Image (cartoon, coloured by chain):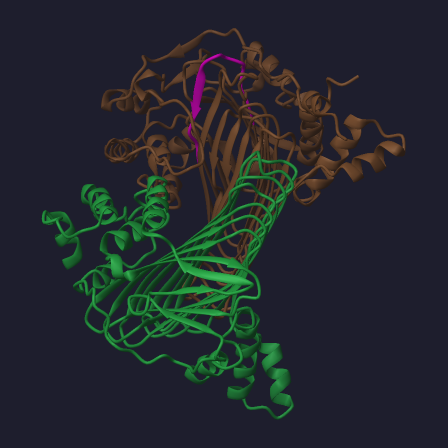
Chain colours: A brown, B green
Amino acid sequence: MVNENLVKDVVKEPYKYGFVTDIETEKIEKGLNEDIIKLISQKKEEPKFLLDFRLKAFKKWQKMKEPDWAALGYKKIDYQDIIYYSAPKQKEKISSLDEVDPKLLETFDKLGIPLTEQKKLTNVAVDAVFDSVSIATTFREELAKHGVIFCSISEAVKNHADLIEKYLGTVVPASDNYFAALNSAVFSDGSFVFIPKGVTCPMDLSSYFRINSGDSGQFERTLIIAEESSSVSYLEGCTAPMFDTNTLHAAVVELIALDDASIKYSTVQNWYAGDEEGIGGIFNFVTKRGKCLGKRSKISWSQVETGSAITWKYPSCLLLGEESVGEFYSVALTNNLQQADTGTKMIHIGPKTKSTIVSKGISAGNSKNSYRGLVKMGTKATGSRNYSQCDSMLIGDQASANTFPYIKSQQPNSEIEHEASTCRISEDQLFYLQSRGIEFEEAVSMMVSGFCRDVFNQLPMEFAAEADKLLALKLEGSVG
Amino acid sequence: MEIIEKIKTNKSTDNLTEIQKICLHKLQSSPLPNPKSELWRLSNKSKLSNFLDYSVNENNSKFDIPYPKNSQSTIRLIIGENCQIKLIEKNYSIQQLSEDKLQKYIKEQISFFNQNENWSDLLNLSLSCKNNILGLKINGSKIPPIEIFSHASSNSLNAKTLVIFLEKNCNVELLQVNLGQENSSLSQSTFFCMKENSSVNHGVVSYGENRSNLLNSLNVIQQKNSSYNLGTLHFKFDYSRFEISIKQAAGNAKTNIKGMQITKKDEQISTYTKIEFNGPNGFLDQINKSLADDKSHAIFEGSIIVPKIAQRTDASQLSRNLLLSNLAQIDTKPQLEIIADDVKCKHGATISQLNEEELFYMRTRGITLKEASKLQLSSFFQEIISFIPISKDKWDLLDKLLNEN
């Protein structure tokens, strides 16, 4: 018989990214209205089309209602009690990393993010976002040689306004949903990636999001465009300090893949999840969507969701191009009083499109973990195929796991398969491992890791190692 | 929506039973279900309003029973007609429920009703008059098979209610047939109360004629060690909703469900199931099949709810769908809500058309395409039909279905 307390101990692990960087920041006043939006736009010296885009989104947002269909319970968010712009004070223009406030570099160093040049060997270009602004982007010259544009979205607005105007809001329109509209109105920074025709991005690109101040929300916007026959792998990581208030994070990510292009987008989300009593933690409401516009284009989402008090996130693929491919690989771990309602939407529009969904949910403590997914075959999606698999693992008898797959087909020449299962860590397997001299906590960790293997295999190498470690950390530690 | 107007304005409550009054009162505050709720979101609004366009008919016209009696011993009842029954034999007894008991039970059920989830039941109970409610108490074993018919006559809405009490250790086969004549609406609500160790093989076959509608609701409460087997078939309705709610009140019970719906033309047929485990060691095996052709729409939504108390539950749910036309559509949503950790729950769903390789194989053996697809369909149907009790030998449902394809 598994000792219940033992399992409970095993899943406890303090949050190690919870420190606050003491740095002078520039904040605007709390609240949200047209003036605030104009102020944000003015601070960022934006062209008129963007201000119009923001104001239009704000008008739409005011008419919208906060969605309540997700299996989540949280106290009402007061949108007037949030600071919508917060930036660390620094010199006007940074020409090299040496000019970045050392405190900031130290922060990212502590988080294990290679911003400094010594760490060049890691061969990952990083865009680091601290509260509302992007601090630094590494390897830009190297990337520019290949024609790849990788910069913060604010810079892109200044230097590549044509691309922004052409693509911003085409995948996730401002009126798409409540949180996307809010983001469209107030987004502060984020990353912009443009991979020109025929280029395979020479290194992995990565952005790192850090929320530092407790009363400001983070609203970043990411736009990735992959032209014909190009390919890119993009990684995203997130952490935040421990505050006993809830911080709102409402991001929008848009991906566009043209003919034969491929985009791989991986996330390891480890926002602060709140303490054992559920006090504090990030409210994570994210809209991520990719558009496979071109023929044979491919978008692959992989995510490891371990943090946030509330996760509301459905990375989706619109499969428009003939023979385009959408993939979704997800591991969501919830503990204590965390709640996650996550999944994907695969909308098959073009013919011969394919999608694969693999979702693994692990719920421990008093947490709630739901998979919610939509697979839709449109009338023109002949010869399309979908395979979905969602497995849940329950640790302890207080956790809950839900599965809500919505499946809709209007095309007889297509096939949809869905399967889901729920299990717990089998006592037989634990007993077997323990009888071979493997310690209890290591055995649990091995089994969780094995349960998630299908997803970890899809992550880029650096991330796979980090994710495995992260899960092990969350599940290991306090026994012994 | 004639009925709704009547419900809203209904003041002359003199000749109504107490239950009708309670339900009418509940409906008056919100006479229609919330069209945005999960349960009604996909339901075709104009078809629902067609359903409600007929005026209520409390009298019953004659109709043709679709097949002859299997044997002399079969007990055949028609709701609204010969409701009088009192059979007390050596091994078993079948009696009508006393008026008091019937009222008490229905009232108790109403108290658990949720306006949206049980809207069909509320409508049914507010419309079905005393004559159209049949309550039976069944006891004993070696009971001859029972057949119960409900039907709706042309140009009217008929509401029929069936309440069945299965006493301890009772074991019975029961077939329910719901028939709709041309241009008719049938509202059928069935309540099963299964005591300990009872078991039933329940069949529900519903089919209509041109432009007939059906709202069929089935509520089952299972006590310990009871075993409920359900085989259902719904076809030929312009609009049909089949809502199944099964509650294993103290766990340790078995539920087997095999259901099928076939839609053609511009029909919409849907099945909603909700299975709740309120105790440990529950078992569920469910399969639902849909076949959609022409411009029709088939819907399946199944939810399995396993609270903390329901440890060692073993539940599986499978939704298999065939989409045969470019204009037809299928929606399916099997869902699991689990809090207990020591459970085995799984579900699966597939949507496809007939297997081309199998068709090709048969055609290389000289079987025509038409025959080959008929063979495939018959195997698709057979699994469900063989699970429906009583009728399967004499009343060749399979032929009926295949010939219509």
Query: Relative to A299, is A182 on the left or the right?
Result: left
Q: Which x, y percent locates residue A381?
A: 45, 65
Give the residue at x 18% y 51%.
Answer: B16
Give the quarter of the figure containing the C terminus of chain B. Answer: bottom left
On screen, residue A100 above or below A310: above
Residue at image x 60%, y 88%?
B363
The verdict on residue A249 being magenta is yes
Residue A420 in sight: no
Q: Quadrant of the N terminus of chain B?
A: bottom left
Apparent side of residue B338 relative to residue B111 in the rendered image (left or right): right
Q: Position of residue A476 (x, y in %)?
A: 72, 23
User: Does A154 sit left or right of A400 as displayed?
Assistant: left
Q: Work out whether residue B15 can be spotted.
A: yes
Residue A90 lies, with reference to residue B337, above or below; the image says: above
In the visual, does A5 lie left or right of A363? right
| Residue toward you, B290 or A380 | B290
Taking the magenta stretch, the answer to whether it contains residue A67 is no
The answer to whether residue B144 is above or below residue A299 is below
Q: Please tell me in which quadrant of the rendered image residue A334 appears.
A: top right
Residue that extends furthest to the right in the rendered view of this protein: A436
Q: How many marks?
A: 0
**Which of these two is toward me, B220 or B270?**
B220
- What x and y, as percent, mark residue B394? 50, 82
Q: The magenta stretch spans which residues? A: A238-252
Percent of width and height locating residue B201 = 53, 63
Query: For residue B27, what is the image quadrant?
Result: top left
Q: Pick the residue in front: A386 or B225.
A: B225
